[in-house]
Amino acid sequence: MAMATGTETSRPDGRFPNQLRSLACSRGLLHRAHGSARWSQDNTIVLAGVYGPKPSSGKNENPEKATLEVIWKPKTGQSSKKEKECELILRRTLDYIFLSAVNPNTTTSIILQVVNDDGALLACAINAACTALVDAGIPLRNIIVAICCGVRDSGEVILDPTKVEEQKVLAHVNLVFPSRPLTVLPEGPSTVDNEPLEHGIISSITRGAMSVDNYLDCLERGRAACSKISEFVRSTIEQGQRAIDLASSS
């Protein structure tokens, strides 16, 4: 899937500033996991596996709530401070949709394996993790989708930057939005305080410095892009459900 809107100058890979790379997602690849998803944005690829819920054993865990554990594995080598920071961001972001009151005194682990990093890695990992949770049947408040936006020297905003583009931009921001309600809540509320649910923002992680106008531009473009990503996620979930239904009836 690719999204192209806008007529500004093209990028090194031929995309327009508002154009996403091709998206692909496969579910159920890890047979020993309770759920899994392989999410790719062209050459940026993350494999997520969900294990649990399983009985908690930690002394500091709340027996009345479920715990979410995130483990980030780099492509090569040992985890560093950067990976630990990604784990923290992911856990805090996923905590928004994780229903901790369900299955109390249990732990659900999400293991993210970086297969390849060609830019927008954190956004890719968030999308992979959420899809894997859906594949595992973990109860969620909502589905979330993420996008990375970069700001060039000229002030131009580009979506879904590659690794080379990330290294050249003044700043980039990873934005996480609730998915469109029809993705998971066909009969649920579509507004909060008279605003469409998908207009809210869950996480915003910025690297570098940008002006307020640039940030607002990122929000506008990122929200529009996430609407398209929501449609892709919904299609992926529906295809998986149809496969399950066919298997059940055979």
Image (spheres, grey):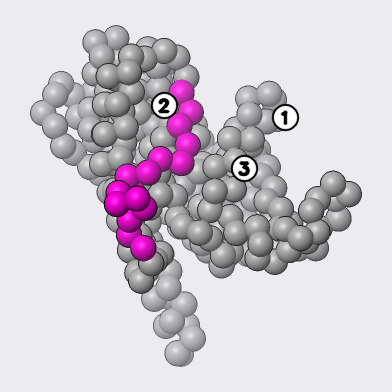
Look at 40% across and 64% down and name the residue there.
184
Kind of residue at badge 3:
Arg
- Quarter residue 176 falls in: top left
Say which residue label 2 marks: 173
Label 1, secondary structure: give it: loop
| Horizontal relation, residue 100 to residue 194: left or right | right
Q: Distance between the residues labelled 2 and 3?
A: 18 Å
The circle on residue 174 is none
Choose between 250 and 65: the one closer to the eye.
65
Choose between 55 and 191: the one closer to the eye.
191
- Quarter residue 93 falls in: top right
Neighbour class for label 1 at 10 Å: few (<14), some, many (≥20)? few
Judged from this view, the residue extending furthest toward the bottom is 250
| Horizontal relation, residue 234 to residue 87: left or right | left
Return the x and y of residue 28 as percentages of the image width and height: 54, 63
Q: Write down the region rendered in magenta.
A: 189-206
Q: Distance between the residues labelled 3 and 1?
A: 20 Å
Say which residue label 3 marks: 91
Q: Is residue 203 magenta?
A: yes
Return the x and y of residue 40 as percentages of the image width and height: 43, 44
Q: Is residue 14 above or below residue 101?
A: above
- Mark 3 or 1, closer to the camera: 3
Return the x and y of residue 134 as percentages of the image width and height: 51, 62
Look at 60% across and 40% down and name the residue there.
92
Q: Earlier in the sequence, mark 2 or mark 1?
A: 1
Look at 35% across and 69% down and name the residue there.
186
Q: Earlier in the sequence, mark 2 or mark 3?
A: 3
Tell me if residue 215 can be seen.
Answer: yes
Judged from this view, the residue extending furthest toward the right is 59
Kind of residue at badge 2:
Val
